[in-house]
Image (tube, grey):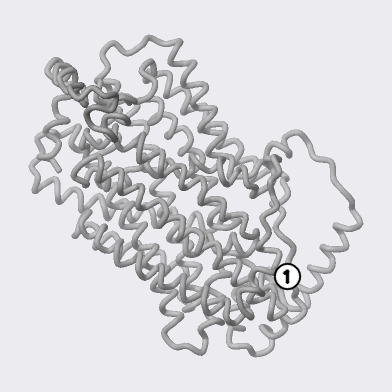
Amino acid sequence: MVLAFPAEGYVYGMMYLFMAISGGIANIFSAFFVVPVFHPLKLTSIYEYLNLRYGDNILRNVTMIIGVIYYLFYMGTVTYGTSVALEVVMGIPFWATIIGYITLTAIYTSIGGIRAVIWTDCFQFVIMVTGFVAIIVKGTIDAGGPGVVISTDRFSFKEFSADPRIRYTFWNLSFGSIIFWLYNSYSQAAMQRVFSTPNVRAARNLYLICCPIYNLILIMAVLEGGVIYAYYYSKGCDINGGGIVDNVNAIIPFTIMELFNNHPGLPGLFIAALSSAAFSTLSSCLSSLTAIAYEDVIKVRYPNLKPVFGTKISKIMTLVFGAVAMGLAFIISVLPGSIQAISQSIFACVDGPMCMIFILSPMFKRSTTKGLLTGAIVGMVVVMWLNMGKLFFSVEDDQSLPYGPTHNCDIYRDGNVTTTMAYKYLNVSNSETTSLIINTTLTVDQSGPQMKTFFQHIYSISYVWFSMIGFILSMAVGIVASLLTAPPTNVNPMTLFSWDKHIKGELCGRGCDGDENRPRTSVDEEMKFLSKNDGTKSVFNMNDDI
C-alpha cells in the first residue's frame, strides 16, 4: 500500500483506482455472508471450521499448510519492499533491513501477542495516513497545483477493453480482483479480529466501517503515484523513463529524498509510515501463523498440553516463522517486476482455490472433502502454470503508459543532492543509458509487429485475472467432483449458510415475515446435533481456550 500502489499509479496510471470497487464488493460480501457463519463458532483457527464441517482433518491440514505458505511469502514480499525503500532513502543495505525488521517484529509479537498487534496497528495506521497526506500535498504544490497534476496522461480512465492480456482494465480491476481481496476475509489474521468482537452485529460493522476507510487509503496511495509523476513531468525528467531509477520499487523513496530534502525530519516521516506498514503486516502475519500452528498442529497432537508450556512453545514458533520469512525475503529480492505484480501473482496460486473451499463449504451442502480437494489442486496447478509461463517463457512485458519527458534528466547526473542515491539504481553509465534508449527505439520501429504463438497469448494474460481464473476453475471442478463422490452423512448445521437464519434473522431479528413468534435461529436443531457428535462439542468450550 505504501510502496507498491503508488509505483503502479506512477507507471500505469490511475486505472488502478478501480481496485477500490473490487475491494468494496469483497468487504460487503464478507460482512453479510462470511461473518454470520463463522463468528458464532468462536474458533481459534479458521481451519478448525473444516473439521467441524466435514468431520475429518484432511482439508483442514491441506488448507492450513497452504495458508502458512501464503503468509510466509506475504511477509517476505513486504519486508523486501521495505528494504528497497530504506536502501534508497537512508543507504542501509537491504539485507540489514530484512534481518532487523523481522527480528524486531518477531520479538515484540512473541511477547505481546494479539493485543500488542492490534494496538500497534492502530498507531501505525495514523502514521501511514500522515505520510500519504504529506507527500500528496507537497508533490501537488511543487508540480504546479491540482490542475497540472490531473492534466497528465496518468489521469486517463479510458481502458474498458475486454482483452485479458491488457495489464489493467476496468473489468479486471473492478471484478477480476474480487477474489484477491476476498481471500483476506478467510485469512487467519482477519478471523482473529472477527472472533474478538462480542457478536455478529459488531463483526459485521467492523467490515462495513472498514470498507470506505480502506478504499480511501487505497485511493490516496494510487493518487500519490500520479502526483509524483506530475511532479517529475513538470521538471522535464521522468525518473523511470530516463533511467534515473532502474527499479520501479525505488520510485517512491527516491522522490521522498528530493521532495523533502530541505525539510529536516520529513524524510523520516516517510520511513516511519513505511515502517509502520511493514511492522503492522509482519506482526499480524506472525501472530496468525503462531495461532495456526498451535491450534491446528500442537493442540491436535497434544490436547492436554499445559497452558504455561503452550505459551512458551508459541513464542518459540513466532521466532521460527520469522526466520523462515527472512529467508524468503532474500529469495523474492531476485525476482523481476514490481512488488505488487510479484505478490499478487504468487498469492493467486492459492487465494482462488482457498476461497472456493470456504465459499462452497457453507453454501453447498453436497460438497465433499474429495471434491473440494480435487478442485483446489486443479486451480492451483493451472495458475502456477500461468505464473511459470509468464516468468520463463518469451513474453513481452506489460505495456506501460508512455514515458514522460526526459530532456532535463541531467540535473540528477550533475551534482544534485540525490545523485548518490540515483546511481545505485543505474545499471549502466550515462552515455550507455542514452545509447540503450535510442537503440531500443530504433530496433522496435524497424522490426514491425511480431507474430505470437498460442502459448504466448495465454501467458500474456494479465496477472490481475489469475485469482479469478483459479477460483472459477476450482469451483467448477469442485462442484462436479463433489457430485461424483459420496455425500457427507452427517453435516453440522452450524457450519452451513442459511438465508433465513444468517441474513433475514440477523438483520431483522424476529418477525421479518410478520410472524413475531417465529424463532430467529434453529438453535434446538444445532444443540441436538452437537449432543450426538462428541467431536464437535468443543466449539462451545472454545471461549475457555481463547
Residue at (27, 44) in percent of width and height: 203
State the image coordinates of residue 305 (x, y, percent, origin top left): 10, 39
Residue at (87, 59) in percent of width and height: 443
State the image coordinates of residue 263 (x, y, percent, origin top left): 47, 88
- Label 1 is placed on what type of residue? Gly
The relative height of residue 291 versus residue 157 in the rendered view (above or below) is above
Q: Can I make out residue 164 in this image?
A: yes
Quarter-of-image position of residue 426: bottom right
The relative height of residue 368 versus residue 274 in the rendered view (above or below) is above
State the image coordinates of residue 163 (x, y, percent, origin top left): 71, 40
- Return the residue nearer the eye: 527 or 297: 527
The number of discs equals 1
Quarter-of-image position of residue 11: bottom right
Secondary structure at numbered mark 1: loop
Residue farthest along the right direction in this orientation: 446
Residue at (57, 32) in percent of width and height: 382
Is 186 positioned to the left or the right of 344 in the image? left
